[in-house]
Amino acid sequence: MIPRSSEPTAAEASAWADVLVRRRLLHAAFLTPTGQWLVQAQSDGLVRVLSGPADVVALAATIQHRTRSTRSKTR
């Protein structure tokens, strides 16, 4: 994996959160006024607090890795 040259931005985190929710990989993701993110995997699940954009991007990478791993096992 190529290391990033800069920290993720709020706009990048917002784009990833939008994709994850639209693809139904997350139930909800909201940016708070403090810069933290509230994310919920399922409608009846716990709400996680992420400290900022880097955590949202890391979550997206984890979900993407899990999705790809699961998909390759079913083929």
Image (tube, grey):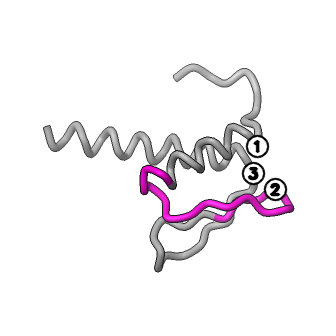
Residue identified by numbered label 2: 35
Secondary structure beneath label 3: loop
Q: Residue at x 61, y 60 (%)?
A: 29
Residue drawn at 58 percent across, 49 percent down? 18
25 inside magenta stretch: yes
Give the CA separation, mark 3 to mark 1: 8 Å
Q: Which residues are magenta?
A: 22-38
Disc 2 from disc 1: Cα separation: 8 Å
Q: Earlier in the sequence, mark 2 or mark 3?
A: 2
Which residue is at 68% across, 37% downward?
Answer: 12
Q: Are marks 2 and 3 in contact (CB under 8 Å)?
A: yes
* Residue at which label 1 appears: 10
Q: Amino acid at mark 2?
A: Gly
* 23, above or below 1, in the image: below
Q: Mark 3 against mark 1, which lies toward the viewer? A: 1
Image quarter in which the C terminus is found: top left
Q: Earlier in the sequence, mark 3 or mark 1?
A: 1
Position of residue 42 relative to residue 26, above or below, is below
Quarter-of-image position of residue 33 = bottom right
Q: Position of residue 5 (x, y in %)?
A: 73, 21
Does dot 2 land on a helix, a strand or a loop? loop
Q: Secondary structure at mark 1?
A: helix
Q: Residues within 10 Å of mark 3 (few under 14, many from 20)?
A: some
Q: Is residue 75 magenta?
A: no
